[in-house]
Amino acid sequence: MPRRLAFFLLLLLLQTAWSQTDSRKWDGLAHDGVHDPRSPALRRLQEPREALRHLPPDGAGNQVQWVEAIERGAIVPRTSLDPERSLRTLDTEVYMNADGSVPIVRFPHRQHTLWLDCSNCHEKLFVSKSGANRISMLRILQGEQCGLCHGAVSFPLTECARCHNTPRTPENVARARKQNRAE
Ligand code: HEC
Ligand code: HEC
Ligand code: HEC
C-alpha cells in the first residue's frame, strides 16, 4: 500500500528530525551549579533548554552553532548600547603556524567581528600585525590568547579542527609563511 508506506516514511522522518533536535540536553537552572536551587527567583528565569533549542545545533560547548545562528538571523544581537554606533566588520583572514605539524590555523576576522569590537583584541591581547604575536598552543590551553575566549565563552579547545581548519598544502604553507613574516 504505497500511501500507507508514504505516511509511515513521513512519520519516521518527523520522528528522526524530532529526536535529533531533542537529543541535545542542557542542565536545568536548578542543577547547573551556578543558581541557588532554593531561590524563588529561579521560576522567573528562562530555562536554557527553552532559549537554546531553537538555535542551530552543535555537538560541543553549549550545543549551539553561534556563528550560524547570527549569520542565519536566528539571533540579532544589539551592536552596542549606543544606538548610533554601527557594527564594524573586517573580512581578512590570518594564516598561522606555517611550520607546524598539525593543520594550519586560519583565523577569520569576519566571524569574530560579528560578535566583538576590534578593541576586544587589539592592541592589548594581540598586536594588529600578522606574525607579530607569539601565539602558542600551550598558552592557549592555559587560558591566554585565543584561550581567553575559546573554552570559556566560545567553542571549546577540544574542537581542534575548528581552529586547525586548513590543510597544509604548499600554497597554504606559502601563504602562512608570507603572513607570518613580521616586517
Ligand atoms: C581556539 C583555536 C585553537 C584550538 C581549538 C586548538 N588550537 Fe592548536 N593552535 C592554535 C594556534 C593559534 C596555534 C599557534 C599558531 C602559531 O604557531 O602561530 C596553535 C598551535 C598548535 C600546535 C603547535 C604548532 C604545530 O602545528 O605543531 C599544536 C601541536 C596544536 N596547536 C595542536 C592542537 C590540538 C591537538 C588541539 C585540540 C586538542 C588544538 N591545537 C586546538 C589554535 C587552536
Ligand atoms: C578575536 C580577536 C580579534 C578581533 C575582534 C579583531 N582582531 Fe585583528 N587580529 C587578530 C589576530 C589574532 C591577528 C593576527 C595576529 C598575528 O598574526 O600575530 C589580527 C591581525 C590583524 C591585522 C593584521 C593582519 C591583517 O589581517 O591585515 C589587522 C590590520 C587587524 N587585525 C585589524 C583589526 C580590526 C580593524 C578589527 C576590528 C574591525 C580587528 N582586527 C578585530 C585578532 C582580532
Ligand atoms: C575575545 C574573544 C575571542 C578571542 C580572543 C578569539 N576568539 Fe575565536 N571566536 C570568538 C567568538 C565569540 C566566536 C563565535 C562563537 C563560537 O563559534 O563559539 C569565535 C569563533 C571562532 C572560529 C569559528 C568561525 C566559524 O566560522 O565558525 C574560529 C576558527 C576561531 N574563533 C578561531 C580563533 C583563533 C585561532 C583565535 C586566536 C588567534 C581566536 N579565535 C581568538 C571569540 C574569540
Image: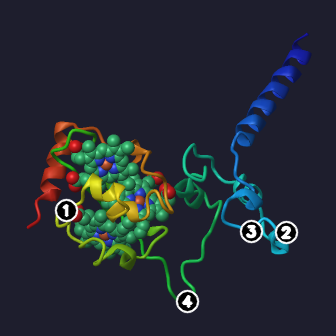
Q: Which residue position is annotated with label 1?
A: 134
Q: Secondary structure at mark 1?
A: loop
Q: Secondary structure at mark 4?
A: loop
Residue 173, above or below 33: above
Give the mark nearer the N terminus: 4 vs 3: 3
Q: Which of the two discs, 3 and 2, sits closer to the camera?
A: 3
| Residue pictured at 65% horizontal, 59% vertical | 74
146 left or right of 8 in image: left
Q: Which of the two discs, 1 and 3, sits closer to the camera?
A: 3
Q: CA distance from mark 3 to mark 2?
A: 11 Å
Residue 27, above or below 87: above
Q: Which of the two discs, 4 and 1, sits closer to the camera?
A: 1
Q: Which residue position is annotated with label 3?
A: 36
Relative image position of residue 25 (x, y in whole percent): 70, 46
Q: Is mark 1 within 8 Å of ligand 1?
A: yes
Q: Are marks 1 and 2 in contact (CB under 8 Å)?
A: no
Q: Secondary structure at mark 2?
A: helix
Give the mark nearer the N terminus: 4 vs 2: 2
Give the mark nearer the N terminus: 1 vs 2: 2
Give the mark nearer the N terminus: 3 vs 2: 3
Q: Residues within 10 Å of mark 3 (few under 14, many from 20)?
A: few
> Quick one: 101 or 114, which is closer to the camera?
101
Q: Which residue position is annotated with label 2?
A: 43
Residue 24, above or below 16: below
- Which quadrant of the figure has residue 48? bottom right
Q: Are marks 4 and 2 in contact (CB under 8 Å)?
A: no
Q: Which residue position is annotated with label 4?
A: 82
Q: Secondary structure at mark 3?
A: loop
For the C terminus, the image quarter is bottom left
Amino acid type at mark 4 = Asp
- Which quadrant of the figure has residue 134? bottom left
Residue 69, above or below 24: below
